[in-house]
Image: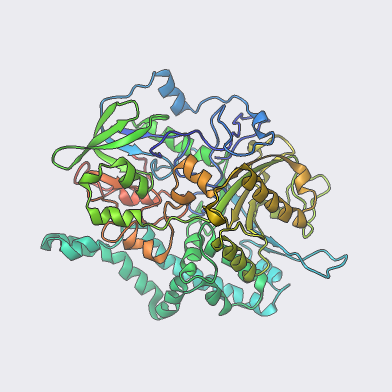
Amino acid sequence: MAQHSCTAAGGWPVAKNARWRRAGGGLQLLLFLLPPCSTPCLGQHKSKSLANSLPSKAQPGAEMPASGRGLCRAVAASPFPAWRRAHTEAGGGLKPEYDAVVIGAGHNGLVAKHGLRLHLRNPYSFTPMLEEGAGSKVPRSLLLGTDMAENQKQIAQFSRKDAQVFPRYEEFMHRLALAIDPLLDAAPVDMAAFQRGSVLQRIKSLSTLKPLLKAGRVLGAQLPEYYEVLTAPITKVLDQWFESEPLKATLATDAVIGAMTSPRTPGSGYVLLHHVMGGLEGMQGAWGYVQGGMGALSDAIASSATTHGASIFTEKTVVKVQVNSEGCVQGVVLEDGTEVRSKVVLSNTSPQITFLKLTPQGWLPEKFLEKISQLDSRSPVTKINVAVDRLPSFLAAPNAPRGHPLPHHQCSIHLNCEDTLLLHQAFEDAMDGLPSHRPMIELCIPSALDPTLAPSGCHVVSLFTQYTPYTLAGGKAWDEQERNAYADRVFDCIEVYAPGFKDSVVGRDILTPPDLERIFGLPGGNIFHCAMSLDQLYFARPVPLHSGYRCPLQGLYLCGSGAHPAGPPSAIETVGCGPGPSPDLWCKKPEGSQDLS
């Protein structure tokens, strides 16, 4: 995973019953796995590819990195997953040589689907309003799901015109998603081969143009309109479709989530598109949770990999990629000095860690290293994991008499999202070095659908909040006082929408951008490894002329979020990397749905 050893964040115990859980053959493959995944699925970053993310569940006895407030007292023992138990009982079993080594075997490092149970979310979006002068009336809210007629009824509360237009907007975006999806599933256009390859390489690289040409055919005469969606500020795009601010702000959250950008920033339209693509269980655009949290995904993938002959080791810190005298990768070196030989090395860590910390600098081009060091990795996200003893009861949608989950409890709940101006103002605060005065909050309650995550009647709440700068105004670093002050501000905001929330809190775990960097090895705390701006996407990810997963060093490949196509957990990066090592290791491309072996 990351190039340094670390404990899992949060201290959430993992007992199966009535205990808190933190929701998180042939080829000889070695995977170094920091428990349980290198790129944490930090709660409400909206993945629709496999499942909406939760923090990875912690290992027994893990320490809390930020104010526990009693959360760690709930820690309980849990049996190791079968794959980890097998290696523990074998006393390590590390061999001196493997065909391939994967550093940081998280979702992208271990590609498979194996034994997962998914909980589909429908409805999927809930935005309660704070409305002055409502008197004794229940404030309005916007609830969106897969039922278009119901969506129109909800939108009509704010604008009948918008309710009529919404189906056309959805169809417009769906068509764009269908055109872009194949580009995400394929390696980018091989610009390096076109620019400086041999005649044969240039002819072969023509095949990489096929997905791009296919996308153009799908979009047809509407290509200019779709180009605007990809390059314009999302506010400009939404203003052309709608007039009601609650609807525009709700949709705009997908354009800025996890990004240090405003809805008024050019290119934010693409980020929205990236977060509405994909599907689940054969349903286009469906949302869901993995039962047991995102850690269950890592365990299932690991179990499948070991069944097919892979070896997985945790707490084996990789400190160096080994290079032979001919400039080819020949394995890795561990922190204890152990050398492990391999024909190829796939890195699921960030480009910055891979090239600036793990790889000997002398073997990489100076210009390449300069571009890697200049990657924009700013992140606005502070993640807060919360344990509560009852469900939040919103003024706009009060709880049922017995406190059972209602449809809106399974949604991404958007707070401080009444209009896009609020989102822009929150962004401007961070640009001034200040945590947002009214932060954008996405609140999710995965235990509303998955009761295995908490004791009966209790719940886990995942808060994905922004905007928070990496360094505070005046060069001040985040300390415990600043963390708690910001978390208190977030809780105060929630309290206004759902009175009684603060009294329900059992414990909390606060992860600011520096915490996310320190604990998970995420540069700048960025969950995508580097920003998803237009200048760092497709054939420019991570840098121009090096977007095909291959690195300047023969035998070294990127397979993490810092590679194309970036974004939420989907394992596309690793599937795309499949044909990459073929000159060094295998001759045919693995099918995307098969296990790594």
Q: State the residue in front, 176 or 250.
A: 250
Q: Hey, which residue is sitting farthest left in the picture?
A: 199
- Choose top left, top right, bottom left or bottom right for residue 1: top left
**Residue 494 image position (x, y, % from top left):** 72, 54
Q: Residue at x 66, y 80 (%)?
A: 161
Give left or right: position of 231 versus 250.
left
**Residue 45 image position (x, y, % from top left):** 54, 53
**Residue 398 image position (x, y, % from top left):** 80, 55
Q: State the residue in front, 367 or 59.
A: 367
Q: Is residue 490 above or below residue 242?
A: above
Give left or right: position of 129 versus 525.
right
Give left or right: position of 557 versus 298.
left
Can residue 25 be seen by looking at this rendering?
Answer: no
Q: Is residue 239 above or below residue 398?
A: below
Q: Residue at x 60, y 73 (%)?
A: 166
**Residue 408 image position (x, y, % from top left):** 70, 55
Q: Hey, which residue is sitting farthest front in the picture?
A: 474
Q: Residue at x 73, y 51 (%)?
A: 406
Can residue 499 be seen by looking at this rendering?
Answer: yes
Give left or right: position of 99 versus 441.
left
